Amino acid sequence: MTNANNLIPSPFHEGELAIQDKLAKRELMDTFGKRAIRSFMPEQHQAFFAQLPFVVAGSVDENADVWASIVSGKPGFLSTPTPTSLLMTNTVDINDPLHKTLKVTGSPIGLLGIELGTRRRNRLNVRVGEVIGDNKVGFNVDQSFGNCPQYIQTRDLTFNRDPLLKSNAVKKIEFNTLDNDAADLIDNTDTFFVSSSITAKNNPKIEGVDVSHRGGLPGFVNCEGNTLTIPDYAGNNFFNTLGNFLLNPKAGLLFPDFNTGNVLMLTGSVEILWDGNPELEGFIGADRGWKFTLTKGMWLKNVLPFSAKFNAYSPNTKMTGTWLEADKNKQAEKLKHTWQPLKVAKIIKESDVITSFYLEGHNNTTLLAFKAGQHLTVQIPSKNSSNSSNNKPVIRTYTVSSSPHEQFYRLSIKKELSGEVSNYFHNNVKLGSVILAKYPQGQFSIDPTNTKPAVLIGGGIGITPMISMAKHIANEGLRTRYTRPLHIFHSAKNKQQRAFYNELKALADNSGGAIDYYSLLSQPELNEKQGNGSNLKDESFDLKGRINADVLRYYLPLDDYEFFLCGPEAFMQHVYNELLLLGVQDKNIFAEAFGPSAIKRKLLNTNDAPNKSKEVSVEEADNTVIKFSKSGFEQRWNKGDNTILNVAEAHGLEPEFGCRNGSCGSCAVKINAGAVVYRNNVSYPVETGQALICCAVPAKGIEVLDIEL
């Protein structure tokens, strides 16, 4: 049976389709586009345009240069006689290139209606129809569609004069080079508009002029000479602007000064910067970008009859960066493996045993972006450091429990009876304390773009990477409008020891059904008697007991999942075994361990492991002798035995370590003789003649491995 949707022509032209293909969005947008892009204005769009105080217009002049303009009027200057026609009282200044274009019947025009106070916006692609005298023009609608409110900063608009009265104060200044005033406006803008076009050839209904809004934090447009570099954030995936750029690399830019009434209008050429372009390195939120080079421009001074006072940034804008920050991030990346000073800005007690420490940069230290699930390596002074200058600081790693979108690192640390570092944080670290840390690293992370549902299972303090992942998924859902389906299972002893309950529950409640959260307590409190003395059901947890196959089978709908585990060794091994009982493939189980704990995988093939780490590799020695030269120990080692760090600890040695996965470098020691291979894909740069003993084993063909321990 033929799908009726397949008979409807695509609302996208070849440039838009090419980019959707490139970014694997075409199939998704084909269905959505045919529903969202109409050849007429629905009633709510007709009412919307009729109440606007201004509209942004894109046009092409007689020289084929593209321009963006603002046309102002009291609400009602736009009207919609029919769903396919728009009538505008023409208040365009004679100095604006749009003025001439509106006199030519059939000229393609892009229109953007935007309400700064409500962040609503809708688009119209039209052609000039009837020109009625000097002050009215009718448009025929080709395409009508809505746009999301992302990156629109709210403003309160106030008219300073009657927009229908021509102002003698408008002054036109043309130029071919951006001066200091232009650069200053661009550098400080949080809002501008861009127009693009292609020549109508095969289908004038979908080919023509488009105009769009761009927003970001002040500093999101980089101005160098006559060239502007602009990030492209996640949007509606229509790619109207970039699709036009692909076929016709020309653009018109308009930067309004909402305080003075001046507008800066530019026209020029464009180059698209695809994802991975080094020019975008370090820019937070940039999926790709584009460069604009000025051909010519003009100021229209005092042209806006209104001012628009800034109110608030869009929530999406707050998740993006600036070029200054991008430069700092690139410099910080070079220091990724060095110790950085971080200052404690806030301390929050999360439970009876867990306290969170919020860390910010100290003395201009940049907080480098990280992946949800990664850890921070910290060092504290040795408790004996006052007695001997030879004592090394104590180094440990803690998972970052904040989201990558937040402007701080949050470490949520459980107080352990025998934990020197955890006790130091709980007993000695205060507000304003400065600690040394290396930037977040680690291979335990989650992909928010994956369409496969994810299940996060955290036991005790193992909830820390899970809350980071959950917040990241939720924030990326806001940014990209796709929230990866998520099921969170949180196991704790009781409510007193459980952390982040309210935070995780709020994430689930506000996710529109995309995120589920389940709290399990192994030893919950007795229900308290309340009010009339009757026992009421305790609603603050879902189930008494531990996570097992029956629990997962009950709560999880039938689907194909990725599982992420974190917690004490026994907990993770138990959950791992239960997942295998459910038929989950090992490659779909990802796990983080604390200290020396790690799950023992049951692999039919070592390549099935999710991180492709191998318990036994053909590159490992069959048998050899490990010699610890400083301590005088020797140990026979056979293929498949423990890592060098584990062997050293079995002899009572206490070498430094942090992550146990080759990312922090804390365990690096000198190799006196022999060579090693690694069971992990180590990310820390290993110096020649050294080994990261946390995941190193003797290499094949080595008879004696001499380690400086």
Image (cartoon, rainbow, N blue to C red):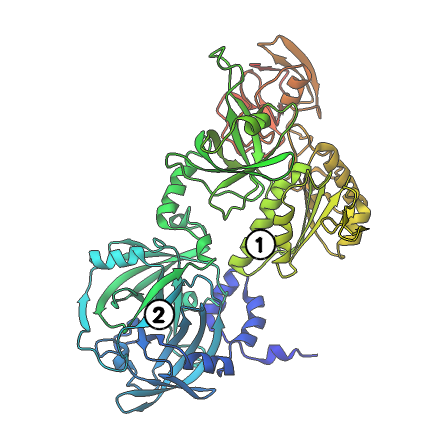
Instruction: Determine crowd level at label 1: few under 14, some 14-19, many 20+ residues with C-alpha closer than 10 A.
Output: many
Q: Is residue 277 above or below residue 460?
A: below
SS type, badge 2: strand
Instruction: Determine crowd level at label 2: few under 14, some 14-19, many 20+ residues with C-alpha closer than 10 A.
Output: some
SS type, badge 1: helix
Where does residue 510 sit, x and y in percent of width and height? Answer: 61, 58
Q: Distance between the Cα atoms at labels 1 and 2?
A: 32 Å
User: The disc labelled 2 sits on which kind of residue?
Assistant: Leu
**Along the line of sight, the residue nearer the viewer: 208 or 530:** 530
Dot 2 corresponds to which residue? Answer: 157
Where does residue 345 sit, x and y in percent of width and height? Answer: 46, 38
* Direction from residue 14 to residue 532 in the image, left or right: right
**Along the line of sight, the residue nearer the viewer: 357 or 400:** 357
Q: Is residue 140 above or below residue 561?
A: below
Q: Quadrant of the C terminus?
A: top right
Residue drawn at (57%, 80%), measured in percent from left and top?
8
Q: Is residue 302 above or below residue 441?
A: below
Mark 1 or mark 2, earlier in chain? 2
Label placed on residue 177: none
Q: Residue 104 sits in which quadrant?
A: bottom left
* Direction from residue 696 to residue 189 in the image, left or right: left
Dot 1 corresponds to which residue? Answer: 474
Q: Is residue 33 above or below residue 367?
A: below
Where does residue 382 sit, x and y in percent of width and height? Answer: 52, 18
**Along the line of sight, the residue nearer the viewer: 252 or 201:** 252
User: The disc labelled 1 sits on which kind of residue?
Assistant: Ala
Q: Residue 331 sits in which quadrant?
A: top left
Residue drawn at (54%, 54%), measured in percent from left and top?
476
**Along the line of sight, the residue nearer the viewer: 346 or 669:** 346
Residue at the top extreme, as displayed: 632
